[in-house]
Amino acid sequence: MQKKTNILQIIFGAVVIVNIALAGVFAFALNKIETLSAEVAIRQKEVASLSAEGSGAHQLATVLKEIEPGREKIEQYFIGRDNYIDFLDYLEGLSGLAGVTASVKGNTTEGSLRFTTTYEGAFDNVMYYVALIESLPYNMSVDSVYVEKISTEDDLWRGGVSFSLPGSGGNN
């Protein structure tokens, strides 16, 4: 009977060891499944974000949208075919601000815009108008400026400014 008890103890011990081993294998497999699930979830998020971003064209569009306010501000300092007439109107508007009567003419030459403005008014106003033109935030090259007194009784002066904006002309 003692032999049977020893065999039962050995069998019981073997069953316990096998159960412990199976539990370890089960725990290892479960851990591996959780790890792989987490990696798959991370990859799915990466794929989803790449899909949402789209191609390089989408990224370029995003960058262009981000720099739009700065680009619009820079474009205000360049004159081309699309805003040439607006610039002429702006120069005439400055004459009203300065209190002079002005006429502005412009034409395009190869690679530049050329402007000539003539004006009449009181001396201070005429000089203020010239100063307003000179202070415009454009890369302009002044060709000539003249001021002459046309009436001694009314303190009336007449003048003109010719200038060009290089690199802006008909090429834009």
Image (tube, rainbow, N blue to C red):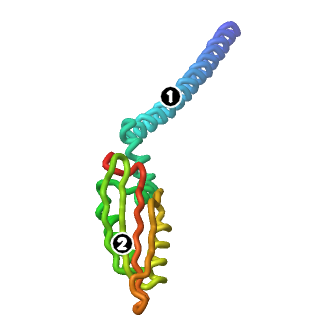
Relative to 25, does residue 38 appear above or below in the rendering?
below
Residue 72 appearing in the image: no
Name the residue carrying label 1: 36
| Quarter containing the N terminus | top right
Asked if residue 57 is positioned above or below residue 136 in the image, the reply reads: above
Q: Give the SS element for disc 2.
A: strand
Q: Are marks 2 and 1 in contact (CB under 8 Å)?
A: no
Q: Earlier in the sequence, mark 2 or mark 1?
A: 1
Res 15 → quadrant: top right
Q: What kind of residue is marked 1?
A: Leu
Q: Position of residue 16 (x, y in %)?
A: 62, 20
Would you identify the image quadrant in which residue 56 lies?
A: top left
Q: Say if residue 139 shows up in the picture.
A: yes
Q: Position of residue 137 (x, y in %)?
A: 48, 63
Local secondary structure at mark 1: helix
Q: Considering depth in this image, is 95 or 159 the residue closer to the camera?
A: 159
**Which residue shows up at 41% across the image and 49% down it?**
167
Position of residue 76 measured from the top left corner of the image (x, y, whole percent) = 41, 60
Q: Which residue is mark 2?
A: 118
Report the disc number at residue 87.
Answer: none
